[in-house]
Amino acid sequence: MDFTFTEEQQAAREAAQAVLSRVSPDGVPSPVLSRGPVAEDFDRALWRRLAAADLLSLTVAGEHGGAGLGPIALCLVLREVGQVLARVPLLESGATALALSTHGGPAGAAVLPALGRGELVATVASSGRTGHDAAELAVGARPAAGAGWVLDGVQTAVPWAPSADLLVIPAQIADGRSVLGLVPRDHPGVGLAGQVSTNGERYAEVRLDSVRLGAPQVVTAEGAWDRLRELLIVGTCALALGVGTAVCRMTSAYTGKREQFGFPLATFQAVAVQAADRYIDLRAMEATLWQAAWRLESGAGGPLPAAADLAVAKVWASEGVRRAVQTAQHLHGGFGADTEYALHRYHAWAKQLELSLGPAAAHEEALGDLLAAHAPDGY
């Protein structure tokens, strides 16, 4: 296990830092960010800048015009996105591009070039019908008369669905296997009911009523949905690490200059202990993130499958980012409740990321099942 980043991965992070340096997380109007608790759309100006910097093609396979990089590079960029709360569907689009590059077949080849150029924006339905059940169980797929497939079902809380061009919908077929439908947002039979996420993004409940897709619009490769879901989980952990890093930096700056009884708050033992605890959380979030990303990228084996590393990373991401914003609010006092200050936005993002793709308890349960299934005889 080598956590040294390659030159290409470092270059991706540096390019992301350069592009995102203009983004203001406090909601002050800028060329790439609009004020308001609820975004009408994602930052299309920023999306174009990301495309121009070749960051949207980062995970697209080389034969389709991309850099062909893997989960580690994607997570490095997403960590930077989380630090500035950039309103772009980079997690969903980047994970889709990477999954389709390896499992997409003809369906992936048809959309990957446009995804890499930023001309096609993809999102993923990963919450299922209620947000608590498996996403692939919420939609059924059956062969259509003649050729193609028919999809029926409901997916809730689909990120940026009103703005995305392509909805990636996991569905289950009769034999229990999962397929991925690449559904245009305005396709006949697709209905959207508006929803708003905790952090102010436009979501939607997506209803599929006998949506007919041609064979080239459905990914049937075994493991395609599992791969995509793994990438979404590790990417969510990267966003949480970015949010937690920025929040702890804000808290350090504030307690270093805010004085009580003639001394900076940071010199008080109770404050220093809380800050040290959050630092430990960040380091644990970082270590478990790169462990999981490395397992996904390298395909390396171990005593437990990569799903165990993903579960550990998501537990730390969920718990760590929640503790980071709670401590930040506490140490900022009343100032942390000022809506003209960015901390309240970080708090909303942290809560959204904590629960996305399952809270800590759900992943602890999954980890317990994996440990029990792989326990040596006699345990």
Image (cartoon, helix red, strand yellow):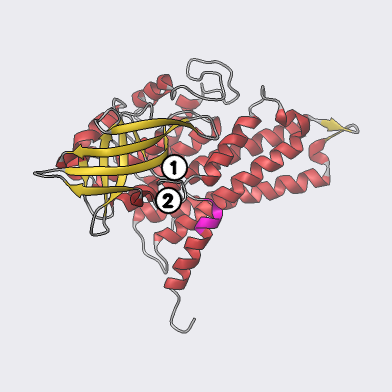
Cβ atoms under marks 1 and 2 closer than 8 Å: yes
* The residue positioned farthest toward the bottom in the image shown: 378
Q: Magenta segment, which residues?
A: 359-363
Secondary structure beneath label 1:
helix
Q: Nearer the viewer, residue 36 or 281?
A: 36
Secondary structure beneath label 2:
helix
Of mark 1 and mark 2, the one earlier in the sequence is 1
140 versus 311 height, above or below: above
Q: Which residue lies at the image location 54% right of the left edge and 30% below the top edge?
A: 84
Q: Is residue 278 magenta?
A: no
Residue 60 horizontal/vertical position (percent): 28, 38
Q: Which residue lies at the image location 45% right of the left edge and 55% below the top edge?
A: 310
Q: Which mark is residue 97?
A: none
Disc 1: CA contacts within 10 A as few (<14), some (14-19) or many (>=20): many
> Which residue has dot 2 on it?
293
**Quadrant of res 65:** top left
Quadrant placement of the N terminus:
bottom left
> Which residue has dot 1 on it?
75
Residue 44 horizontal/vertical position (percent): 40, 21
Q: Nearer the viewer, residue 129 or 278?
A: 129
Residue 109 visible in rendering = yes
As shown in the figure, which amino acid type bears the numbered disc 1? Answer: Cys
Number of callouts in the render? 2
Residue 300 horizontal/vertical position (percent): 36, 60
As shown in the figure, which amino acid type bears the numbered disc 2? Answer: Ala
**Distance (Cα) linking label 1 and label 2:** 8 Å
